[in-house]
């Protein structure tokens, strides 16, 4: 693909800081940060250190056809109303975030406080909710570009 946007390390730290500031403005703080493998792990670690909040990893590898992990502990925390921030590098097709909504049964819970954050949000994705926090909005239906993160070089 010729349409590539390369993102550097300073941009990653800046994006995490901006998302953290947006949560601060909303007076919302996660009790747990969930970084999605592979792309969401590094931003989640950065945010975990920035906010001094515990981080958990969740493997949802729909694109790589590896399968998914079900983490009943995290979904149980969601059901009790714990503040959980699910963080990924990009909401591309929406499939990964939709899988979490469905696996954790978030639409069925009377009370949950799970929020979704991404560094890049594709506005034309099929995510059934809106991303709560993002640093950069893109629309792949208008301009198809591949975001290349520094850990992918």
Image (cartoon, rainbow, N blue to C red):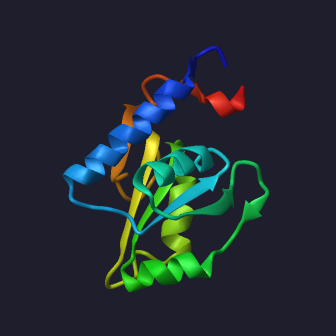
Most extreme residue toward the right is 66
Residue 73 or residue 99, whichever sits in front: 73
In percent of width and height, residue 114 lies at: 39, 68
Choose top left, top right, bottom left or bottom right for residue 7: top right
In percent of width and height, residue 21 lies at: 29, 45
Question: Residue at 60% across / 55% down in the picture?
Answer: 36
Q: Is residue 43 visible?
A: yes
Q: Answer above or below: position of 69 versus 60.
A: below
Residue 43 or residue 143, whichever sits in front: 43
Question: Residue at 38% across / 33% down in the picture?
Answer: 136
Question: Residue at 43% across / 83% down in the picture?
Answer: 79
Q: What is the count of numbered marks? A: 0
In percent of width and height, residue 77 lies at: 47, 80
Q: Answer above or below: position of 59 versus 147.
A: below
Residue 30 or residue 70, whichever sits in front: 30
Question: Residue at 55% across / 23% down in the picture?
Answer: 8
Residue 148 or residue 43, whichever sits in front: 43
In percent of width and height, residue 105 lies at: 48, 78
Image quadrant containing the N terminus: top right
Q: Is residue 123 visible?
A: no
Most extreme residue toward the top is 2
4 relative to 52 in the view: left or right: right
Image quadrant containing the C terminus: top right
Q: Answer above or below: position of 6 versus 80.
A: above
């Amino acid at each position: 693909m010729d349409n590539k946007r390369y993102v550097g390390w300073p941009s990653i730290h800046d994006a995490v800081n901006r998302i953290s500031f947006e949560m601060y403005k909303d007076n919302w703080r996660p009790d747990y940060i969930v970084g999605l493998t592979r792309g969401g792990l590094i931003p989640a670690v950065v945010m975990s250190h920035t906010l001094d909040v515990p981080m958990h990893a969740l493997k949802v590898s729909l694109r790589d056809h590896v399968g998914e992990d079900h983490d009943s502990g995290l979904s149980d925390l969601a059901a009790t109303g714990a503040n959980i921030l699910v963080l990924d590098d990009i909401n591309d097709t929406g499939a990964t975030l939709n899988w979490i909504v469905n696996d954790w049964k978030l639409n069925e819970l009377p009370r949950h406080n799970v929020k979704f954050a991404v560094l890049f949000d594709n506005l034309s994705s099929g995510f059934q909710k809106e991303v709560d926090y993002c640093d950069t909005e893109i629309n792949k239906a208008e301009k198809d570009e591949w975001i290349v993160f520094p850990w992918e070089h």
